[in-house]
Amino acid sequence: MSNKTLFEKVWSDHVVVEETPDTPAVLYIDLHIIHEVTTPQAFTVLRESGLSVRRPDLTLATMDHSTPTTPVSSFRDLAVVGESAANQIRQMETNCRDFGLDLIGFGNEFRGIVHVIGPELGATQPGKTIVCGDSHSSTHGAFGALAFGIGTTEVGHVLATQCLLQRKPKTLAVNIDGKMPAGVSAKDLILAVIGKIGVDGGTGHVIEYRGDAIASLDMESRMTICNMSIEGGARAGMIAPDDTTFEYLSGRPRSPRGADWDSAVTRWKRLRSDDGARFDQSVTIAADALQPMVTFGTNPGMVVGIDDPVPQGGDDPSFRKALDYMQIESGKPMTECPVDVVFVGSCTNGRLSDIEEVARILSGQKVAAGVRMLVVPGSQQVKNQAEAKGLDRIIVAAGAEWREAGCSMCIGMNGDTVPQGKLSVSTSNRNFEGRQGTGARTVLASPATAAASAIRGRVADPRTFA
């Protein structure tokens, strides 16, 4: 038997029908995570076809994209998100009730962003195939799962059959050698990776992140890395499970227990690329050369080190268009850009360690005059844990807003938006035109850079707060 990559091991374990030149493979899905935005049409098709959900026990349902981050005590409180988003929330409750699905809804202590609560619950596990109608499903690959986003039609297929038609992707090894310097985070690392391979460098591939720098990361940092694989064009991102993974999962509500736990760990330990396994492509990055990274354009590949000037871009019209939209000049560092809004949150950087880092920098400081800062936990569990540590009090004392859990300003469809023309430093994952609101200008950055920028009132190097 030939040596296999981590991806190939998980893929082959889940093939129901092999791929042919004319037909995709049929792949079995271990966990289907659903939310209110990409499911309404899928449930409508099931109703019209007289179909049921095949495996309700393998379907995890929550609400996150359209939910307000202000307290909700009744449906009247949904007015802030607008009629369309409020209807999605109401329809999700109806669909889950009609199809016998448990919904992690308002009032549930585990409610939050799909890609935050899956790991928190222990539903995300090594070796699983995991899908969701959301492109950042790759987050779960941090556990050695094969996880990727699917479209609304495919959501319906999985609900009805627990299987999915897929062509087998190629493999891309991203090797991160060395040790990351102080003041450099996982968000800086993945932005550097995307800057190197480009927004289409991973197209048609599943990335495996490897090397000493990856092995040294905690699970929340690994989730940040895998989360943005799609921004590099990849189908998914994966990291081999290890003791850090097992320690994170131990004792969580949906993790195995007792003898089942011992058996699972034994199985999970085999989930790593074999020595001599061949990847279709590979890229190497020196971790010790990294610095805090920020985007300057309108896709995540337009990224620069905090100390470096914005590049010239030559005669590329799309490059010039992006800089014109962002109102940013080539040849100048991003640290000269004034900031209007700072957003900390999202499935990329809305976890406890992210909020701890923000609170560390904000402690004893004040958000600059004229800057609005939102800090939005990725789940109710994160919110409760942060409040138990007193982090919310530090954040509020600095002049920032502490919100309820949700996707919030990452997508600008739930009442949290950046005003037209204003510049936002955001810990989210996309900086396309209008992503955070019509005419909004988005600079992607780490939680530390976001907090430093809120204090300085301009894009700022977080290392000055070390």
Image (cartoon, helix red, strand yellow):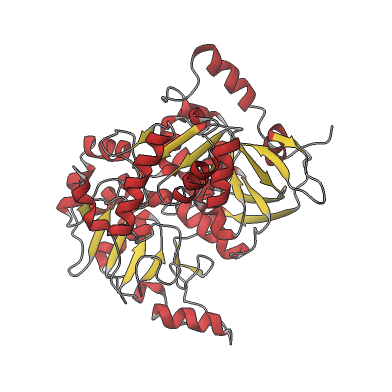
Residue ID at (33%, 67%): 424
Q: How many numbered marks appear? A: 0
Residue 261's spot in the image, x, y percent? 53, 18
List x then y, in percent, for residue 47. 49, 42
Residue 380 point in image, percent of width and height: 30, 39
For residue 326, which quarter of the picture? bottom left
Q: Is residue 284 left or right of residue 100?
A: right
Q: Please say whether residue 138 is visible from this viewpoint.
A: yes
Q: Quadrant of residue 278?
A: top right
Q: Residue 204, located in which quarter of the rendered image? A: bottom right
Describe residue 427's horizontal placement relative to residue 362 as left or right: right
* Residue 392 pos. (x, y %): 21, 45
Q: Going by the picture, which residue comes out furthest to the left?
A: 397
Taking the image as drawn, is residue 112 in sight?
A: no
Task: From this view, report whether residue 348 is shown above or below residue 29.
Answer: below
> Can you say which quadrant of the picture contains the N terminus?
top right
> On the picture, is 224 further left or further right than 313?
left
- Residue shown at 55% from the left, 42% from the top: 49
Residue at the outermost top position = 259
Identity of the residue drawn at 74% across and 47% down: 24
Q: Nearer the viewer, residue 377 or 460?
A: 377
Residue at horizontal 20 percent and vertical 66 percent from the top: 368
Residue, far right: 1
The relative height of residue 445 versus residue 347 in the rendered view (above or below) is below
